[in-house]
Each structure stands twice: as C-alpha cells, then as structure tokens.
Amino acid sequence: MEKKQLNIGLIGLGVVGSSVAKILKNNQELIAARAGCNIIVKSGVVRDISKARGDFDFPITARVEDVLEDKEIDIVVELAGGVEVAFEIAKKALFASKPLVTANKAMLAYHRYELEQIAGNLPIGFEASVAGGIPIIKALRDGLGANHILSIYGIINGTCNYILTRMKNEGVEYQKVLQKAQELGYAESDPSFDVEGFDCVHKLLILASIAYGINAKPEDVLTQGITEITQEDIAFAKEFGYHLKLLGIAKKSGEEVELRVHPTFLPKEAMIGKVDGVMNAISVVGDSVGETLYYGAGAGGDATASAVISDIIEIARTKSSPMLGFKNPFEKDLKLKPIAQISSAYYLRILVLDKSGVLAKIATILGEEDISIETFLQRPSKVQNHSILLLTTHICIESKIKIALKKIEDLEVTKAKPVMIRIEKP
C-alpha cells in the first residue's frame, strides 16, 4: 500500500537546513515508517542561489513567496534565522494554514505568544530551538505534564561550556581559550551573543514558557556572561569543591518565577556540573517525578536537524498539542520575580592594595547590608603591592549585594571593579 506524501518547504539551507535535507533523504524509509507517510522536500529557499551549499535534488529559489504560496507544500520549515523577518515568514505560513517548524530561538524569545495565538489549532514545532538534539521541549510539554516544575538548571550554550572546561582542565585564561574555540568553529568571530549570555536567555525563556506559562522578554532576565572569569575563580572552585558553569536558571517560589543566566558555582555532587566540553545538559525538577536530567549535543547541523525532523514526524502523525503546553490558562498567574529580590549566596573577587585594615573595611560594608561572610582567602596579585581577596557570603538578596559591591568599588583601596559569581545548591 503506497504511503501518502507530505511536502516540505525548507526556508534556509545553511548548516541545519542542509542537514535536514540530507537526513530526510538518507533515512527516508525509516522516517516514512515512523511518520506513516513519505516526507519529501519539495523546494528550498536561500538568500543567494549562487552561494547555496550542497547538491540538492529539489528546486531552489531566492523567493520565500515561492514556498509560502505553493498550495502543494504541507509544512513550512523556517531555518533562516533573525527575528523580525523570520517572524513575518512564520506569520505568513500560519495565515496560509501551513504548520510551522522552526529552530529560531531568538524569534521565539520575542514572539512565541503571538505565534501561539495566530496558530490556533495549527501545530508549531520548535524542538530544535533549545539544546539542539536533546528533546527537552517534548519532555517539558508532554513527558512531565503531570508535574509542577520546581526548577530548571540548564547548560544550554556549548561555546561557554567548552571555554570553562578548557580553563578548568588546562589552567589557561579566557582569551586564549576563546581564540581556540573560534579556530575550532565553536565560537563566532564576534562571540558576544554566546559569551555574554544572550543565547542562553533566549532558550531559557522558551523553557520557562512551557514550564510556567510566563510571558517575559529577554530584557527582563538577569543576565551575566563569562568574560570576567579568571584562573583565580577556577582555582577557588577547585579548592572549595565547586563546578563553575554558565547556567540558565528558572525557579518557582510561591507565585513567582526567577529567570536568570549567569556563571554559577555548583557543588561537586551536582550531576549537571559534571557535564564538560561542548555538550549541553538540562536538569528539571518536578514535584512528583523529582530530578530528571537530559544530556546531549546542543548544537551542530545533524543534531539540530534531528530535532527539526522529529517535529515534522509529529505533525505528520496528525498529533497536535498546544504550542506552549497549556490548553487552558494556567491555574495561577505566575509573575516574574524582580531581579532586585532574587536571593543567592555570592562569591566575590576584589583586587585591593596590600595593606592592613582592608578586610575590616570590606566586612563593615557587607555588615551594613546584613551580608555575612562565609569563607575568605587572600592571594598575592601579579600587580606589586596588591592582593586579591576571595570571599563567599551567606544567602542574601540581589539588591543588597549590588549596593555593597558599589560601596566596595568606591573604596580608595579597591583597584578594580569587584567580580561577583552566584553560588547555587540545587
């Protein structure tokens, strides 16, 4: 019995788009058996046909309209990137009653709720938008659907995880490792989107929408990158039994949700802290299931294409679940916790003049803000007559540590802006 055919329009034929086309062709029989129909790329769209990479066995055009207006195309797969142009493509596909599959985390970070409203009962697949080949979207939306999600801790940027791993294992400074990451293709020539934490923020917002039904924008999220991390911080982590990772964190407390992305000291026993290199991992704690951990390749053409095709197969099976996981409004209107009210323990690195009374001044400032010191170390600095103070605090709120840091920075004995890293004990 001949299977039905499902026609795909691929908008964007870069690394991921090319991998989607390749896998659909190479694994055609397997995918047809799982989907219940043959899935064929009917046409593809590139910005510049002369620069198209790969030998494709389907027509290529530079006009998005050729896909969006083609009545024989059943699913639009948007892999072009960007925010507003991609949003327009997504809207046009949905208005044309075509299901949409996208890997575009930036577009979803800003427009996911608008797309959900436009789509209605039309399916939108976006598994590939977070953590590449790890099926975290389906896990949150379906597999853990019976749970209140208590927390999400995610290593969701392979570039940063690679850099921090090399710094830990080889004792080299940030800039040298970044250069190597760029040579290997793990980091862009302008790495700021990754190393400043913005990539993580986009992914965290998508996860938080599914877990909590909360609508926030990237600008609302506490965001700190890894550019200030030095070997002093790495050495401190080793000495006191911590892993140092860039994490995306979502935590529910009462009727509020914390959203933050920042370098984090984690205790050695934390499973997620043991994930090294370019790999991704997400720890999700549900009130019924407890902790679940998801690990795998967070980027790369084939891994991301695997997630794209999983969405295509799901749509082919005519299974359509709500885009962000809720058929009805969530039982409680959860609110985003103000950044100033977030609480944590903190690690501080402070470069000061090497003279008596310095620690007493810093301790006095911290005491004025009701912040108590838990551990303290003093290290010699490479700068003559200077010392590096390393200390950790007990739990306090963000607003108070920020006030204290500004006062410490303004001291005559302080010779550089203090560096702060948050400490989490999941």
Image: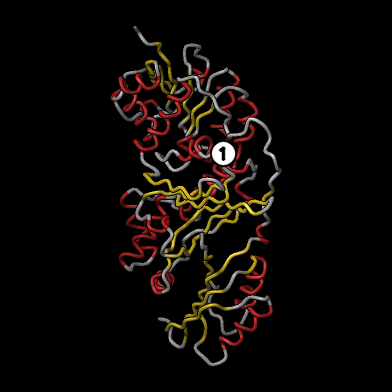
| Residue 51 appears in the rendering | no
Under circle 1, the secondary element is loop
Q: Residue at x 56, y 68 (%)?
A: 345
Asked if one can make out residue 304 in the rendered structure from this viewpoint, the answer is yes
Q: Residue furthest front?
A: 288
Q: Amino acid at mark 1?
A: Ala
- Count of labels in the image: 1
Binning the other alpha carbons within 10 Å of mark 1 as few (below 14), some (14 to 19) or many (20 upward) gives few
Quarter holding residue 132: top left
77 left or right of 412 in image: left
| Whole-percent x, y for residue 117 in the image | 65, 28
Colour convention: secondary structure
Provide residue 228's location: percent of width, then percent of height: 47, 65
Position of 385 relative to 24 (above/below): below
- Report which residue position mark 1 lands on: 146
- Picture quadrant of residue 39: top left
Q: Quadrant of the N terminus?
A: top left
Q: Residue at x 51, y 46 (%)?
A: 289
Give the camera-side residue of 141 and 410.
141
Residue sitting farthest toward the right = 333
Q: Residue at x 40, y 13 (%)?
A: 5
Picture coordinates of residue 380 (x, y %)?
Answer: 42, 84
Taking the view exactly as shown, the residue that stands out farthest to the top is: 1
In the drawing, does residue 267 fall left or right of residue 122? left
The front one of 256 and 25 is: 256
Going by the image, does 95 lie left or right of 158?
right
